[in-house]
Amino acid sequence: MRRAHSLKRIVSALTALVLLLVLPSAGMGGSGGVGMDVSGFSSVTFEGEPVDGSIFPGYTLTVINIWQRWCGPCWVEMPVFLELYEHYSATPEADVSLWGALYYGDHPENIQEAVDFVAANGYCWNHMIICDEFLEVATAGVEGGNLLIPQTFIVDRYGIVRAQFYGKFETLDELLPVTEEWLAILNVEYEASRGDTDGDGAIDSADALLALRHAMGVTQLGTNELLRADMDGDGSVSSADALLILRAVLGAE
Ligand SMILES: [Ca+2]
Ligand SMILES: [Ca+2]
């Protein structure tokens, strides 16, 4: 019985290796999926809870790591992601979020194996089952449409994939400079976009009016508009934000 179970695991692992192009080398920059919008994704967490694009707006940067249960390079980089998770857990003001996205192909039994694997190893960051949107990003521009695993994306507040890395990260010294560099870029971008409610690249009275109309209940702003209009960063758009935008307009004139 035990032997049959082990054999099943080995067959499962070999099949997965044939199906995937498992990458042994370290974090090569990819570009096929950069710029793609994944804000509309939906999936389920390892706990069976629904998860969707609402995970993005609350963080300057979200790291999505695509992995597979029977993928050696994925196991190698898991401790690196644990270090990354611990680093940003200790600095919550950095606003970095980490998610694992499990690929299981034709092997749904891998899901429970993966749940057990992360629990046994204390890989306690967020985990979800991969969704079509992430698969599209992962295979975009790759010859033959192969899925390269492991793979890591950096996603901004608006749910746009800003960077993509094929292969494993071997150490935190390799991974951390990448997230820190993007954190700096995205923070500058975010600050520059605040007040530009309609996202046309300029902050003017139309932006203040949009925020005011939302505050008055006349119109309903979308997720990205809300992010840009929330000047005081309290998570909602009120007349105080509209006033701050107007002040920015008047100050700039
Ligand atoms: Ca504007
Ligand atoms: Ca506000």
Image (spheres, helix red, strand yellow):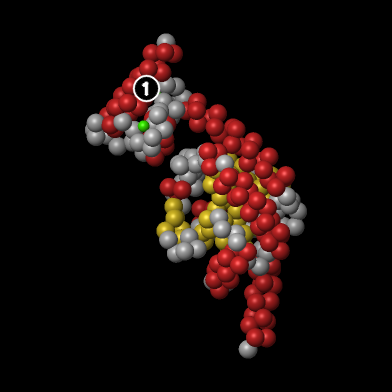
**Front residue of this view, candidates 135 and 154:** 154
Image quarter where the C terminus lies is top left
Along the horizontal axis of the image, is 171 left or right of 163? right
- Residue 196: % across, % down: 42, 26
Farthest-out residue, right: 25
Along the horizontal axis of the image, is 233 left or right of 189? left
Q: Does 92 sit above or below residue 43? A: above
Residue at the (54%, 71%) spot, across then down: 112
- Residue 193: % across, % down: 47, 28
Farthest-out residue, front: 90
Is residue 228 in view from this perspective? yes
Along the horizontal axis of the image, is 207 left or right of 201? left
The residue labelled by disc 1 is: 244
> Quick one: SS at disc 1?
helix
Is residue 61 in view from this perspective? no
**Quarter residue 121 falls in:** bottom right
Residue type at numbered disc 1: Leu
